[in-house]
Amino acid sequence: MKKIYYLAFALIMTFAACETEEVSTMESTANSPEESIGDVSALDEQEVDIEQLEGIQSQFLSELSDLDLEQIGNIDLQAVDLRNSDEGLESGKGKRRPRITSLCLVKDADRCPFEDRQPTSNMWWPENDTDFFNTTAYFSSTRYHRMIFATFSNGTALIRGITKMNDGKCKVYVNVWLRDKQTYEEFSANGGEFKLEPGCASQAANEEELLYYEIDNERSWLYSKGSDCLGQGCFGLEQRGENLRGQLGPNGAAFDSNIGDNGFSNWGWITDKHSGERLWVMDFDFRLRCCRGYH
């Protein structure tokens, strides 16, 4: 519990200095926090504010205390210091803290060109890998279920928060670390391939403008809760696709109609945390709206 409270304090201190902006390719405008709090549709049309991000993190940390944390075991639950400290400042363990380079709100992709058959969502967790048009396979943001995305100067990134089954009760606590950021030149030189999806943004994407991340299976976990989940409890996550990685940048949200917006997509295996057995496929696919002041 001390770790959780320390993390909450660190997050609040971080966001207190955060100003908001649209992702780097978009021009930002100001908004009133009262106009958007608790209203997902309004949030999608307005700028991110500090209180929204604080609320996402506070709820995630608060609800963690109600879960069976023993299931998570030795998977990293250390407090993440999201404060960009002075260069050279060391952490309590004598290690340099990685600097935050972007801190963003996850926004659901509209699933273009299949928006008439697939719900707006940020995650796909199907019973099988051809279950494309079952609404219960898609997980989305709601008033009380949202996520953040952060990148760090050491080439890692973090997806953290809660997402909920679009047509059901299942909700998933997401704590996914990404590692080894590479440019397309670096990635392709090692045999990596850009994954072209039939989604609208994917068709418009330039692979050379994207950054490529791998799921860190040693630090990542998903915790699902609800009678209609495909499985309940804590699961591991690993990269899916021999030559694939997560794709971050302009048109990164493969199935979305907002051409040019920054986003992220990735393909994973949900695994048994203890045996490593691959249980289900999953995808992330979402747009990003980021805070100002992180470079």
Image (tube, rainbow, N blue to C red):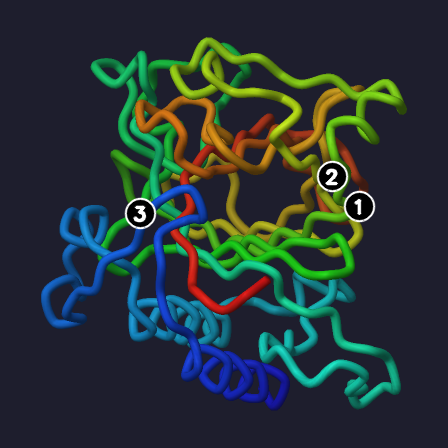
Task: Return the disc, 3 or 2, that comes first in the chain's sequence.
Answer: 3
Tags 3 and 2 in contact by the CB under 8 Å rule? no
Tags 3 and 1 in contact by the CB under 8 Å rule? no
Q: Marks 3 and 2, Cα distance to the nearest angstrom?
A: 24 Å
- In this view of the protein, which residue sits in the foreground, 78 or 262? 262
- In this view of the protein, which residue sits in the foreground, 186 or 80? 186
Give coordinates of residue 224: x percent, y percent.
Answer: 49, 49
| Secondary element type, mark 3 | loop
Q: Is residue 117 left or right of residue 66?
A: left
Task: Return the disc, 3 or 1, that comes first in the chain's sequence.
Answer: 3
Question: Disc 2 marks which amino acid?
Answer: Glu
Q: Marks 1 and 2, Cα distance to the nearest angstrom?
A: 6 Å
Is the residue 138 above or below the residue 84 in the image?
above
Where residue 180 is drawn, which disc sits there? 1
Q: Residue at x 36, y 59 (%)?
A: 21
| Secondary element type, mark 2 | strand
Q: Quadrant of residue 212?
A: top right
Task: Return the disc, 1 or 2, that comes first in the chain's sequence.
Answer: 1
Residue labelled with disc 2:
214
